[in-house]
Image (tube, rainbow, N blue to C red):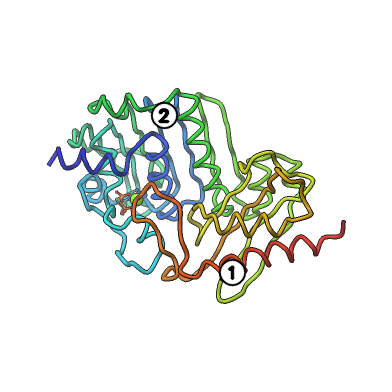
Amino acid sequence: SEVSNKIAAGEVVERPSSVIKELVENSIDAGATLISVEIKKGGSIYMRVSDNGSGMSEEDAKICFLRHATSKVQTSSDLDAIYTLGFRGEALSSIGAVAEVELFTKRHEDETGVCVTCKGGEILSSDEAGIPDGTSILVENLFFNTPARRKFLKKDATEAGYITDIMTRFIFAHPEISFKLIIDNKEKLFSPGDNSLENSVYTVYGRDYAKGTIPVEYESDGIKITGLIGKGTLARPKRNYQSFFVNRRYITSRTIIAALENAYKNQIMIGKFPMAILNIEINPSLIDINVHPTKLEVKFSDEKAVYNAVYYGVKNALYEIPN
Ligand code: ADP
Ligand code: MG
């Protein structure tokens, strides 16, 4: 019903950045190699996510706004499934329930594409469309029918900042994908998608940071640590240049922060923080995740093993460089 859709929508769609997160994840799932995000005025009036991924059939394009319309296999064996447990196939329906949405999509094998419009949970139209392969979703007037929620939105610049943060995490998690972020007609981020994490750092933090990175590659107890860390001379006054991923999903973890920063002891002044982009590859069954789509803090069933892997991974990388 419309009521239950609106309730579900509140779980997944908290603000414009949650829409961007869901849409970009879908583009990644669709195998896109180019993903372009455009927003206006903090996103609440205008957000567009376009990709060159698999596209949808006409039939799938019509049903994707229904609750639990998912083409993805449900298995609790991947972190993605744990994250979205109970929320599978709810992103597009949730977004469609609280905004005006225009979906353009075309599969490579189809002659023509399709355009489906949905407003406040109702499908308004479905037409043939001459468009390139892939999917483009336009979301306008977010929360037009839930004014209470709209009131919770912050200033445009703050909401745009959240979207930039989300895009930054995708750029770090997927250096093989080219991402573009346009805010109010200005290109804010562009990553080449050449599978170089160093170039991802260049895109997000600029040349000095990209030049000052040290690669990390380490494995112990079946836990693999890869990524880039910054030279001590590039330490930051805050932790804002630290991003951690588990199986390429952005997370936060006190254990990882502690391991990273202890490994830098004597390399960095007290009160300064290293740059780090680290991915932890670990069997998903060893992760205890808070089952809520907006919570990112993870616990590991063996925190000590994760601590050690990060600590020694970072320490080895740091002391291999001549200084
Ligand atoms: P979920 O991702 O959990 O399956 P969503 O509501 O996010 O649920 O999406 C519903 C379905 O719509 C997906 O399973 C997928 O089949 C299709 N879909 C959504 N976005 C895209 C896209 N960008 N490209 C291709 N298919 C898509
Ligand atoms: Mg999805």
Q: Earlier in the sequence, mark 2 or mark 1?
A: 2
Question: Circle 2 is placed at which residue position?
Answer: 43
Question: Circle 1 is placed at which residue position?
Answer: 224
Residue 191 position in % (x across, y down): 60, 44
Amino acid, disc 2: Gly
Nearest to the observer: residue 233 or residue 249: 233
Nearest to the observer: residue 10 or residue 172: 10
Q: Quadrant of the C terminus?
A: bottom right
Residue 40 position in % (x across, y down): 44, 25
Nearest to the observer: residue 185 or residue 12: 12
Please, what secondary structure does the residue beneath circle 1 have? strand
Amino acid, disc 1: Lys
Q: Is residue 183 left or right of residue 153?
A: right
Residue 12 position in % (x across, y down): 31, 44
Tell me the residue at 38%/27% (across/down): 153
Which residue is most to the left?
Answer: 1
Residue 212 position in % (x across, y down): 77, 48
Please, what secondary structure does the residue beneath circle 2 have? helix
Tell me the residue at 76%/41% (across/down): 208
Q: Is residue 207 left or right of residue 300?
A: right
